[in-house]
Structures are given as C-alpha cells and as structure tokens.
Image (tube, rainbow, N blue to C red):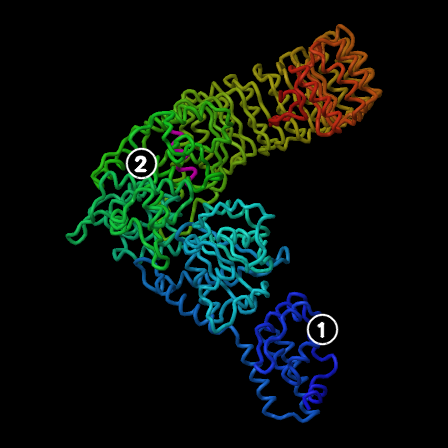
Amino acid sequence: MADSSSSSFFPDFGLLLYLEELNKEELNTFKLFLKETMEPEHGLTPWNEVKKARREDLANLMKKYYPGEKAWSVSLKIFGKMNLKDLCERAKEEINWSAQTIGPDDAKAGETQEDQEAVLGDGTEYRNRIKEKFCITWDKKSLAGKPEDFHHGIAEKDRKLLEHLFDVDVKTGAQPQIVVLQGAAGVGKTTLVRKAMLDWAEGSLYQQRFKYVFYLNGREINQLKERSFAQLISKDWPSTEGPIEEIMYQPSSLLFIIDSFDELNFAFEEPEFALCEDWTQEHPVSFLMSSLLRKVMLPEASLLVTTRLTTSKRLKQLLKNHHYVELLGMSEDAREEYIYQFFEDKRWAMKVFSSLKSNEMLFSMCQVPLVCWAACTCLKQQMEKGGDVTLTCQTTTALFTCYISSLFTPVDGGSPSLPNQAQLRRLCQVAAKGIWTMTYVFYRENLRRLGLTQSDVSSFMDSNIIQKDAEYENCYVFTHLHVQEFFAAMFYMLKGSWEAGNPSCQPFEDLKSLLQSTSYKDPHLTQMKCFLFGLLNEDRVKQLERTFNCKMSLKIKSKLLQCMEVLGNSDYSPSQLGFLELFHCLYETQDKAFISQAMRCFPKVAINICEKIHLLVSSFCLKHCRCLRTIRLSVTVVFEKKILKTSLPTNTWDGDRITHCWQDLCSVLHTNEHLRELDLYHSNLDKSAMNILHHELRHPNCKLQKLLLKFITFPDGCQDISTSLIHNKNLMHLDLKGSDIGDNGVKSLCEALKHPECKLQTLSLESCGLTEAGCEYLSLALISNKRLTHLCLADNVLGDGGVKLMSDALQHAQCTLKSLVLRRCHFTSLSSEYLSTSLLHNKSLTHLDLGSNWLQDNGVKLLCDVFRHPSCNLQDLELMGCVLTNACCLDLASVILNNPNLRSLDLGNNDLQDDGVKILCDALRYPNCNIQRLGLEYCGLTSLCCQDLSSALICNKRLIKMNLTQNTLGYEGIVKLYKVLKSPKCKLQVLGLCKEAFDEEAQKLLEAVGVSNPHLIIKPDCNYHNEEDVSWWWCF
C-alpha cells in the first residue's frame, strides 16, 4: 500500500527536478539539514550515503527512507529553512494537484501546509534575543547632559546613512561587500551599529539584503582564546533555533558587524596562505578575525567594520575592495543648537559658540558629542567664576587643561581624592604607552603589570578619568581618547630626566621619534604631540601643578629644541618636513620666545594653506621667525569662503579674523631681515589680500630679492606689482608664470621697467597670455632699462610679428639682455631672418632658447650664419623640438668649430638620426671645439652612431655632459660606448641614459661603468624638474 501511495503521490523524477534546481552550495546545505532530520520508525538517514550522493542518488534515498508524502514533507521543511520560498510554493501547488488526482486525506494536506509555514518563520527567537539585548543598550546611550529629542534627532540623520551603506555604487554598478564606518573617537560609531542590530531585529533594516546579522565587539574578542568561528558568533544564538552551523552554508545572506576594530590587540601579521577557511575549526581568535577580514573565511559574507580614523590605515592593509564611509558627528548647526540648549543665558551661549568657533581645530573636536559637552561644562564653570573663555578656547590644550582641572574641583562641599605624584606618573605612563601602541582598552591584569593597583584605578574612576565597561568584564578605558592623549602628554612633563642615550628608555619615551612623526604615517600620535607642546606653556603647567599638587618640569623644552635642530640640519626637503603640523604644535605653546628659538632651525619653509586654521597657526608662527630666508606658500579656499553661514555677527570671525591673520603672515616680509625669497603659487587671493601683500612689499624694511607669483589671479591687473618694483630697491627677480596678466599687465610692468628706480634683473612671463601687442611694450622697455638681463617669454603666442619686435630691441645698443627664452612662442623660420640681423649687432646675449618652434632646417641654417661669426657671443643655444633633420647638421657642425664661445648646444627631440650625429661628432673631435654640454635626447639614434660618439668622447676633453635618453641604442650601442665610458680618462661627468630601457646584459655593462669610473653619473632625467623648463643638464 505504501509503495502504491509513493508511486502515485511522488511522480517520476519529481523530487529530482527540485534537487536539480539547487546549486552546489545549496545542495550541501540541504544535505546538512537532512542529517538533522529524524524519523523514529526509520532511525537516522545514513549520513555516509547522503554525504556522497549525487542529486539522483539523493532523490532515491529520500524515496527509500521517507516513503509517500513524508519525502515531500521533509523536503518542504528543509526548503523553508533554506528560505527557498519559490520552491516551496511550487512544491505546494504540485502537492495540491497530486492530492486532487489521487484524493488524499484533507488533514494530511493541512499538516503539510502547517509544516511549511512553521519552517518559513525560522530565526524569530534570535531576533527576539537581539531586540532584548540591544534595546537595553540603546536606552543606555544618551548624549551627556542633553534632552532625548536632541539625541534622537542625531540618530535619525545617521540612520539614513545606515540604510544606504550597502547600496549599489551608481558609478561602478558594484555592490559593496565590505563597508568601513570610520570616524573620530566618541563620534557615535558604536551607537549607530548597535542601532543597526536593533533595527534589523525589528524588521526595519536590511530585510531584503541579510537573513542574519551578527555583532562582534573588539573589547569582548580581546578576552577570548581558542574557539571556532561558529562558536564565536553563538553567544546570542538561542538553542531553540537549531545548530548555528546550518545558516553558515548561506554566507551571502550573512552580515558580520565588527565593532571597534581599533580596540583589537592583534598584529594581523599571519601570511594569507596560512589563514583558515573552515569556520568549524578551533583557532586563536586573532587568527579567526584575520581570516574573516581578509576574506579567506566566508568570502561571500558581508562585513561592516567600525574604526577610528587613527587606525583606518592599518585596517586598509587587510581589506580588499572595501568602501569607506566617514561618520562626521554633529554638524555645525547641531553644535550650535546644542550649545544654545546647554546654556540658559543666551549671551553666554553666544560667547561660548563664538569662542569655540574661532578655533577651527577645537570646534571640529566638538563634532563628538562628549567633547562638546565637556567643553560646555568647563566653560560654564569658568564663566561662573568670571574667567575669560576666549583665552581658554585659544588652544585645545588650554581647554582640556581646564576640563581636567574641573574634574578635581570640589563640588557641593566634596572634593575628589587627588592622586599622589607616583600614582599620577603611573597613570600617565599607561596613557602614553597606550597611545604609542594604539591600545585604548585596558584589562585589569594589564593595568596591574603597568603599575596601577585596583585602588589607583578606583580613584581615577571616581574622578571620571577612567571608566569601567558596563558590558564587558575587566575592561577599562579612559573616558575619551583625548583624555588619554592629554595624560600621555603629561607623562613627558613628569619624567625626571632626559639624558641622551639612556639604555633604560622605552620606545615611547623617544622624543625625537615623536617629533618626527607625521599625521600621515602616525595619525595616532598627532593630538598627543599637540598636547605636549601645549603643556610647554607656563600658565598651563602652573594650573596643573595647582590641580594635582605636583611638580612638573619644563626641562623638556631644551630637549625638544635640540631635536628640532637635528631635524633642521637633516637632508629633508621643506615639503617633507610637514611645517603645517609643526606650526599646529608650536601654536599650542602660545610661547613667542620658544617659537622664535624653534624656527631658528629652519631657514626655509613650505606650507599649503587651505583651511582657516592653517592660516591662523602659520601666521602666528611665521611672525615670530627671525632667521627665515625662503617661504614657499600656497593659499587656496580661505579667501573664497570669508563669509560663512552663522547666526553670529559677520565680524565675529570670518572677514576680520582672516584679514588679520593674513596681515600677520605678510608682515614677515619686513620684520624678518634675512628673508630673501617668497614663492607664492597656485593661490586665490581677493583684492584686500593682494593690497596687504603689496603694501608689505613696498615697506622700507622689506629685503626681499626674489618674488615668485606663479599661477596667481590679480584682481586689479599688475598695477600694484609695478608700483612695488619701483618702491622696493632690493627686488631683482620676478616670476609671474601662469598668471595670465595679458598684454595690459605687461604694459603696466613695462612702465615700471622704464623707471630709473626699478632694480629688476630677471623677469619671467612664461604662459602669461602675451601676444604681439605685449612685445611692443617689452621692446621699448628693453631699450631704456639697463638692468634687466634675463627675460623668459615661453609659452606665449608671440608669432613672427612678436619675435620681430623683440629682435628690433636686441639689435639696439642700449639693450643689455643676456638671456632670452622664446620656447613655444609659435613662430616659424621667418623669425630666423629677424633674429639673424639682431644677433649680428647684439654683444650682450649669451643664452638663447628657441625650442619647440617651427624653425626647420632652413631657419636654423640662417641662424648658423650668425652663430659661427667670430663676433657672436652666444654661449648656450637651445634648439629642442625645432623640426630639424640631418640636413642642418653640417651648418651646426660649422658653428661648433668656428664659435669659440659656444659651450652648450641642446638639439633634443629633433630627427637628426645617425647620419646627422656622425657629422656633429666629426666637429666634436677637433681640438678647438669648446662644447661642454650636448643634448641629443630623442633624436632617432641607434647603435650605428655609437662608434662615432665613442671616438668623439676619446678626443674631446671638454665635453662633460651629454644626454642620449629615449634613443634605441640597444646592447650593441652600449658595448661600443662601454669601452670609452669605463676609462677614468673619459672626461664625461653626466650621461643621460635610462638603464631600465636596456636588456639585462646592457644594464650590467652600465653598472660596471659606475664601478670603473665613479666620477661619471648615469641618470635618465633630472630628479628635480626645474620650474623654468631649462635644459636637461641644468638639473645636475
């Protein structure tokens, strides 16, 4: 009877057809669920057979052990657990159709439907447990000292962020699998992801994306030892849900939230090949986390990782294809609203908001709710005592000194117990070591080893410096990261001595390492370093000494100055030194004498000002410098955003404060008697800023000699520059490259050039939008000006007409120009006639650059008639990219032979080929050839010319620099050159060749040259590209 029922109820290949729709992962999951299914009358399904069974074999096993409708019932349950709703619906329809055909009992069909609905509701108990746990946690989280509606207003804003974390990227079409939620300490990352857990459990978040979401906290993970990953996530898993392993076979529907990556005390140094794929195997928890993050274990699962900004770089090294989202905390409007709600007196609120906002760094810190509360709390106390909050908000150190002191202020007759000096030193050592090692969570045993007893910890907990984690046993943290950073800085002030080379010193005690740290490489040290400099202020020290009844030493000042002197004498370029960071630190001191001493170590500074705070700290530090010789400066954004949207009066900060800071910075031009060069580039200055700059340039005490204003927009043209050229008797070099002053600007400059008081010797107008009209003004100025010796007009559309005007000036006896650059000026061979005539009469010009113009062979032949004339004084000739061929090489060779003054000849980027170089080499071999530098870059040369080059190098004792880059000389060519180059008798000092462009054998020969002839440098190009775009050899 049973067999007959099975035959009619279970159509041929019925179950097999459903099993065929399962992919490999789903089939394995089906088998695991089947393993857990038990029928008392049949016993366990034989697992060994099921495990190896193919789809057809599995269908037959199901028929054998679950006859009739039981096979369908078991299958439906499993499909339900696997959340395969479509299969369940289609199976139900087939069951109903079969029931109508053979007339089954109605009760049986009803039972099957109930089974299906029951299994589709799987996971309810887990969700209930998560709701219970995280609802309690969420209720605990409230913004310190604020009404609930304010807190939930912030939560609603950030909840929108949560909803879209895993949205498809509209640009790439990819859906992120790993999302990193980063932000400052205390900004609300943990609160947000806990809310995500609650919302998911309540069915309002990620319902279509993730079937299960698991929460892993760094503090808890740190305390765990060996276990499997399945065990790791089982903490909140109800036993009524069945084995957790069952859901692991659907990893694409799982989300793992890893909260507080920055608190994980793991090195993550395991090689990838050694990581674990099997989530059932037991391993150290650090091993499991590394395997999960690096997508070796459960690669299809999604991850949401929270971390502080200071550790995002370490996390990035572990992740692949991750998407970063930054949680910014309270907006400016939210901070303003908070402050106005905190203070009942609106005048006080306005005063505090204004004071905080005047320090951009401090105001940015207040994006963190706890910091904003702490600032308001201590400022309120200060105002109640009649203190000046403006001074307190001047630096971050001043504010936190005030806050820390407030923690030990007697309240309502009671006074917190003060730590003794030994306890305070131990606390500061714990803080410092933690900051250096990025350890922010301390366990009872760790604290004991570091010297803090339980009594010490309890005392600091009473003072709200340290707090115990409410959820995770034995976990202690500083109440905020900035509190830990402040006490870490105090460690250096409490340290007894700073003897050099002390073998007992630990790494975190090394001041030099701290000073050399940068926000890019060591972001975790940045704020501690700022606090340390801030504590060099005597007022801060006295305040802390009164608070803690202890003695702090300022001997560290001299030690820091020694470290800065070493840094100033190092090989670092100004841009590598990170002056903005140094200025931030020096500003914290508010100690003018110390800043002046510190900056004596740096004769040259380079800074890029793109925020108001950058301008504030730079102006404050630079105006106290007395030994600066060069300032390289870029100012963007600041003057474009003077007027900010705020409820405060507009004169509170923006326009007036920015103008005042800019005035301070520019005052360096006349207060620093050693300053000789200002390089202001890529800057956007408004009219008032320009007026201030030019006013300082005209100051009688301004000793500036070199002024570079590259890529600058001049609101009122060049009239102010022209006036400065007349009034400033020291200014000899002016570079306006890329500033687009046009012909009208040149007209103003030329008026100044014609003035007898103008002392300018070098003028660069490269890429300034000049045309033929501007050349007319310049030609007249060159005739009347006796001092201008160097003029660069590169990258202007002068044309043949413009060159004619310049040529007319050159042949005038009054013209004293020594160097003229006409590179990329859009003229043709016609200009060669004008230049030829003028050069015959000109006795002063020694350097001429005609590169990247359409001269061609005919034009150069005309010029060569002048160049080889005995009266031609030209020493440096640049003809790069002038569309030349070997047809002009005989004329060039004649110049080499007949002009005894010619020292440099650059013919790069011309199609001279081997035949042309052979002609030139014949001239180079003559004893009366005086050429010292020869440029043959990208001239179509092969190995065929290398013998001629070798012969020339043997005979010529004056040639010291030669460029052969971007030619296909090959191994054969290098072999020919090698014989000459390796000899110490070879006078060549610099050879332009890219070693990597040759095969291995040729590279070995070039390396051998370096050994045999150490005086010869072989380089592909100059390492320091010259801004004025001069010849290759000037870089050496």
| Residue 397 screen position, x and y as percent | 32, 40
Residue 43 x %, y %: 59, 78
Element type at mark 2? loop
Q: Amino acid at mark 1?
A: Asp
Q: Residues within 10 Å of mark 1 (few under 14, many from 20)?
A: some
Does label 1 or label 2 sit earlier along the sequence? 1
Q: CA distance from mark 1 to mark 2?
A: 78 Å
The residue lying at 43 percent from left, 55 percent from top is 224
Tell me, yes or no, whether the highlighted magenta stretch contains residue 615: yes
Q: Please rate how many residues cluster around mark 2, counting C-alpha atoms within 10 Å: few if below 14, some from 14 to 19, many from 20.
A: many
In this rendering, position of residue 619 left or right of residue 18: left
Residue toward you, 440 or 674: 440
Picture residue at 50% right of the left edge, 67% below the top: 205
- Along the viewing direction, whichever of 804 and 228 lies nearer the viewer: 228
Q: Are marks 1 and 2 in contact (CB under 8 Å)?
A: no
The residue depicted at 54 percent of the width and 53 percent of the height is 293
Task: Please name the residue that numbered disc 2 is placed on.
Answer: 535
Left or right: where 133 falls relative to 208: left
Q: Which residues are magenta?
A: 613-623
**Which quadrant, please, contains the N terminus?**
bottom right
> Which quadrant of the rendered structure holds the C terminus?
top right
Which residue carries the number 1 mark?
57
- Secondary-structure class at tag 1: helix
| Residue 586, visible in the rendered structure | yes
Left or right, 554 with reference to 862: left
